Amino acid sequence: MHADAFDRYHHGHSLLHHLDARIKVVVTVAFILSNVLLPDGAWAAFGLAFIFLLIANALSQLGFGFTLKRSFVALPFALAAVTAVFSIPGHALAEWHLGMITLIPTDAGLLRFVSILVRSWLSVQMAILLVSVTEFPDIIHALTHLYVPSIITTIIAFLYRYLFVLTDEVMRLMRARQARSAAAPGSRSGGNVWWQARVAGNMAGQLFLRSYERSDRIYNAMLSRGYKGQWMAMHVQRIQLRDWLVGVAAVCGLIVMQIVGRL
Amino acid sequence: MELECDGDVVKVNDLHFSYPDGNEALRGVSFNLCAGDKVALVGPNGAGKSTLMLHLNGILTGRGEIEVGGMRLNPDNLPVIRAMVGLVFQNPDDQLFSPTVFEDVAFGPLHMGLSEDEVRARVDEALRMVHMTNYRDRLCHHLSVGEKKRISIATVLSMHPQILILDEPSAGLDPRARRKLINLLHEMPITMLVSTHDMALVKECFPRTIVMDEGKIVADGMTAQILSDAALLEAHGLERP
């Protein structure tokens, strides 16, 4: 397993790469909030949001279609909103009979569904861009200095640090199982589904126990270096005039979007 | 075989400890460490070496007396003692818990309440001591095992400890990384207690050796003398290098 299999950061020297992480986090969250607040069917505003995203892509020097290509991973989750098509009252568009069930898609429902799809698709792209131009430790610092409770930033930091270690642990467990998944001559390797499920269950249990014991050792390592229950952080970055200007420009763009969406 | 030493750095007297499952890990351990001592702690698996090390900065508390730098180890002076005893764990993935090298080396000094400038100076100094200055902004999980081990040592050096305690420092290292570690142990002018199974390392780096088995110290003396006692080594599952 390569250690950076989960790292989404793309090294670069663009304006966005060098922007203060706090500004980037705030603008991303504001962009997502703005999308959520736009009314259903505000197509002009959604169009502006898309242009905003394209400009951000261009500023990152990662290419116009950079986030587009990666955004489709989130679509299956947005499809959960498909029930909106049938549950929002409005003018019936059709009537489908599926055995005992009758489904009636409505125009208001369809509008809501497509709007949700567009909102999530735009929001996911901005989040993808944020993690592509900001190193993960910088995002954690930004959250710390934006007064996100330290318990939450600590959990995120640990999750990031040990995701790699745990994945390695899983790979080792799988390899050990594979190495001993032999078959006697003339017979099939492995047992029935029930038996395989039991093996997988045991592996999950093993992983939990190993992680649990590891957390104990990590806590000891923290204690022995003076940890008293409060995570300390240093100010590694200073916000400069340029950061403020980009932040203010972005927020102005979002305000315009909201006004256009409500016209 | 007791050496002449009044224990100005560490003094342990009649230490007993049992794990919650009833396993008696330490049965009356006593020894002294003096400034500048470089001591190897050897013995078979389960001898109580790691348990003993975890007692020296109060992670575990057993029955008996422990003094560090002339101070009795108790809850009141635990924070001061933790800064004096630099404990490096066996698995560097347990030791390096921060996302970046800088943050990990800064963790100890920050928790000692030092100013940001002082913390930065200490991080630079510690990384220089382990020859890893260029790794300051690297991500911990991108390092090799040998690099992680050296950064682990820097994470405690930045606290300016009086004694460095290492658990199996050469385990899992390739020959080159091991050689670099040995050179490092040689050049660091600090009191050391190092648990290891690597008898060649013991012979090369540590003038004094403590042998533990079944929760007790069975021998404490000059390394050359202990390594020449074939009967002693064999009785406690050790081999001559």
Image: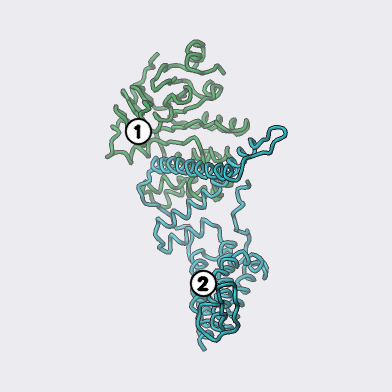
Q: Establish if A102 lies above or below B200.
A: below
Q: Residue B43: x percent and y percent?
A: 47, 22
Name the residue nearer the viewer: B34 or B147: B147
In the foreground, B96 or A1: A1
Q: Nearer the viewer, residue B3 or A258?
A: A258
CA–CA distance in space, label 2 to label 1:
51 Å
Residue located at (57% from left, 64% from top):
A18
Q: Chain of mark 1?
A: B
Image colour assigned to chain B: green
The type of residue carrying mark 1 is Pro
Q: Residue furthest front?
A: A100
Whether A88 is drawn above or below B204: the answer is below
Badge 2 marks a residue whose secondary structure is: helix
The quarter of the picture where residue A55 lies is: bottom right
Quarter occupied by the C terminus of chain B: top right
Q: How would you rate the neighbour count of disc 1 (Cα within 10 Å): few for under 14, some for 14-19, many for 20 or more?
A: few
Measured from the top left, where is residue B100 in percent x and y? 52, 50
Q: Is residue A129 visible?
A: no
Q: For mark 1, give the secondary structure.
A: loop
Q: Which mark is residue B20?
A: 1
Q: Report which residue position mark 2 lands on.
A: A32
The tally of labels here is: 2
**Residue at 43%, 61% in the rendered image:** A145
Q: Residues within 10 Å of mark 2 (few under 14, many from 20)?
A: many
* Residue closest to the eye, B194 or B64: B64
Q: Colour of chain A?
A: cyan
User: On the same chain: label 2 and label 1?
Assistant: no
